[in-house]
Amino acid sequence: MSELSVSPIHLGQQSALPSSPEDARLDYVPNPRVGSLYLVRFAAPEFTSLCPVTGQPDFAHLVIDYAPGETIVESKSLKLFLGSFRNHSGFHEDVTVGIGQRLFDEMKPVWLRIGGYWYPRGGIPIDVFWQSSAAPHGLWVPEQGVQSYRGRG
């Protein structure tokens, strides 16, 4: 796991894709609006990991919402972290919840939620949701905006 970084190693530098999520280093920078209650959203509509049974790629649309505390995650390091799952084998539930918990544990936001909208495997779409707690009172939390899978519906 990475340690809190207030001097990012990726920002403004050439960075290789980490070989695994465990090797990925997430960078955090001071929140420029400490004390303000606001929401940050990251959407990763082309997220990929590997099926632990078949080794075939699984695809998801991830939406990560958080209310920052003392730090914010640096977006390039988040992009590299998410990209490191391309060669990582894991069930949808473990991957989605693991990403949310790692971000929450390291960044220490006021609140965080993640929605993993996985494309069908075996004809069944799987959506996985995790949040650190109930959203803080007064925080505007919009819908994640990802439609349920409809196929040719």
Image (cartoon, rainbow, N blue to C red):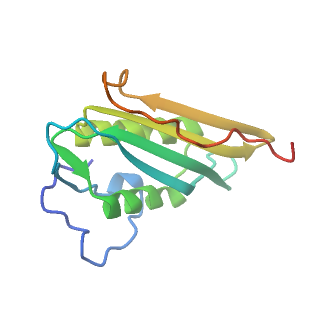
The residue under the point 57% across, 33% down is 128
Query: Dividing the image into 4 quarters, which one contains the C terminus?
Result: top right
- With respect to residue 138, does 15 lie above or below? below
**Identity of the residue furthest to the bottom in this view:** 14
Residue 136 horizontal/vertical position (percent): 31, 24
Q: Is residue 26 left or right of residue 115?
A: left
Residue 84 placement (x, y as % from top left):
44, 60
Whether residue 44 sits left or right of residue 9 in the image: it is right
x 51%, y 37%: residue = 94
In this view, 111 is above or below 75: above
Q: Residue at x 43, y 43 (%)?
A: 64
Q: Is residue 91 visible?
A: no
Q: Residue 22 in the image: x percent, y percent?
A: 35, 52
- In the rendered image of this protein, does residue 28 appear above or below residue 149? below
Q: Residue at x 48, y 52 (%)?
A: 43
| Residue 66 visible in this rendered orientation of the protein | yes
Q: Nearer the viewer, residue 46 or 54?
A: 46
Q: Residue 3: where, in percent of width, then height?
A: 18, 49
Quarter of image, res 117: top right
